[in-house]
Image (cartoon, grey):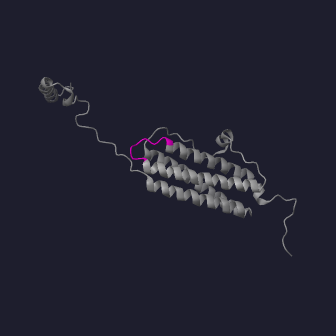
Amino acid sequence: MSALRDPAEPHAGATSMPLLQRYLATAIDLHRQVKHASWNLREPDTVILGKSLGKVALAMEYCCELLVAHAVMHDGTVNGTVQLVAARSFLPRYRLGRAAAHLHGAAVIEAMEIFAASARSTATGAVERGDRDTAALLIEIARCTERQIWMIRAAMPPAQPVPPPSPLAGEVSPDLLAPGEVDRYQIARNGAASSGGSRP
C-alpha cells in the first residue's frame, strides 16, 4: 500500500514559508552589502576585488531568485521591500563606509560565512522535518555562497601595513625650511636633545 499524503495536510514546503521568507530577506540584505562594499572601496589597487564583488553580487541575486521560485511554487507571498528585509535579515549591520579594500573584503566574507553556515544548519532541520526540497535548496545556496567566499579571498589585496613611527616624528622637515634656516634648526634641535628639553 502506497503512502499518500492527506490533501488537507499542508505540504512540508509550505510549512517552511516563514523560514524561506527570512532567508530571502537575508539574501537580499547580503546582496546589498556586497554592492555597498563594491561602491566604497578606497585604495588604488581595488580593480580585481571590485570586479570580483560585482560577480559575487550577481551570484547572490541568483540565490534570491532561487528562494523566490521556491516560495512561488508553494503559493507563498514574496516579500522583498526594504522595510521587511531590514526587519527579517539575521545578518549584522554593515558598518563600513568608504574604507580600504581588505577591510570591505573581510566584512563581506564574515557576512557570507554567517549566511552559508546558517543555511547548512537549517537544511539539516528541514531534512528532519521531511522537507527535502527546502533542504536541497538551502544546501545549493550554501554551496553557492561558499564559492563566492573563495572568490573574494582570491581577489583580496593584502592588508596595508601600518608604517612605524618616524624617529623624527613631530619635527619640521628640513625641506620645508628656507636654506638659511636649516642650520639654525639643526643647532636648536641638537641643543634641546642634549639638555633633555623638548624639541622645537
Q: Residue at x 40, y 50 (%)?
A: 157
Residue 91 visible here: no
Rendered position, 140 above or below 97: below
Q: Residue at x 62, y 50 (%)?
A: 27
Does residue 98 appear to the left or right of 87 in the view shown? Answer: left
Does residue 28 appear to the left or right of 79 in the view shown? Answer: left
Q: Residue 189: where, in percent of width, then height?
A: 16, 27
Instruction: Answer with the quarter of the image where residue 7 lies.
Output: bottom right
Main secondary structure along the magenta-highlighted residues = loop
**45 is within the stretch colored magenta:** yes
Marker count (numbered): 0
**Closer to the camera, 81 or 185?**
81
Q: Residue at x 49, y 38 (%)?
A: 97
Does residue 16 appear to the left or right of 29 in the view shown? Answer: right
> Which stretch appears magenta?
39-46
**Closer to the camera, 178 or 192?**
178
Rendered position, 183 above or below 116: above
Quadrant position of the N terminus in the picture: bottom right
Q: Residue 130: where, in percent of width, then height?
A: 74, 64
Rendered position, 5 above or below 61: below
Q: Residue 200: where, in percent of width, then height?
A: 21, 24
**139 is within the stretch colored magenta:** no
**Closer to the camera, 166 or 76?**
76
Residue 99 visible here: yes
Residue furthest to the bottom in view is 1
